[in-house]
Amino acid sequence: MPAIKSIVTAAKSWIGFIPLLELGLAMVLSKPLTPKQEKFAQLVADGRTQADAYRIAYNCTKINESQIVNASKLMSNANISQRVRELKEKLSNKSLWTREESVQVLKEVIEEGRAGDKTSAVKELNLMHGYNAPIKHELSGSVQVVHRVVWE
């Protein structure tokens, strides 16, 4: 019986410790994010991959393997993952059509659609994820400038 009594005593002490543990976790989660971490969280919540979000938030010019590792480390940060959850919840309450839903529908078109539809869906996905080269728009013609002087 003494062993059971010590287990009960230990359990009671742990139960008293749980609110303190939760309080400590709340303090950790309330630490503000850096601007780059916030941008990363917003991009992930908006449907970007972690690696893409990392590249954009941290202004990476080249793609390499370390960005995937760093993005994963960021998402394992309790503050950042909590922020992503908050943002996703806010977005789901606001939007009728999310980026994630767009990607899912386009994916379904690619898997089940006709050849022409598949090509269009792939083009749209590439455009959404920024895989295409920047689009350059050239304008030609003249601009007429009219100056009006108003006297009061």
Image: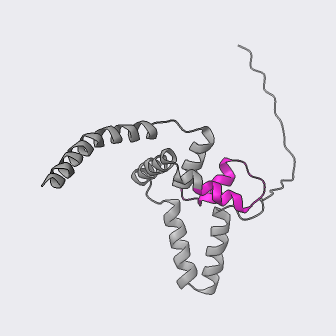
* Quadrant placement of the C terminus: top right
Look at 55% across and 39% down and name the residue there. Answer: 33
* Position of residue 127 measured from the top left corner of the image (x, y, whole percent): 67, 64
Residue at the top extreme of this rendering:
152
Find residue 28 and report its image quarter: top left
Look at 64% across and 74% down and name the residue there. Answer: 122
Q: Is residue 31 magenta?
A: no
The one of 136 and 25 positioned closer to us in this rendering: 25
Residue at the front extreme of this rendering:
2
Indicate whether 11 appears above or below 63.
above
Residue at the left extreme of this rendering:
1
* Quadrant placement of the N terminus: bottom left
In the rendered view, does 46 fall on the left or right side of 147? left
The one of 1 and 75 positioned closer to us in this rendering: 1
In the rendered view, does 77 fall on the left or right side of 137? left
Indicate whether 63 appears above or below 93.
below
Look at 84% across and 43% down and name the residue there. Answer: 143
In the rendered view, does 3 fall on the left or right side of 46? left
The mark total stands at: 0
The segment highlighted magenta reads: 46-72
Look at 24% across and 44% down and name the residue there. Answer: 15
* Position of residue 146 measured from the top left corner of the image (x, y, whole percent): 81, 33
* Position of residue 116 measured from the top left corner of the image (x, y, whole percent): 64, 83
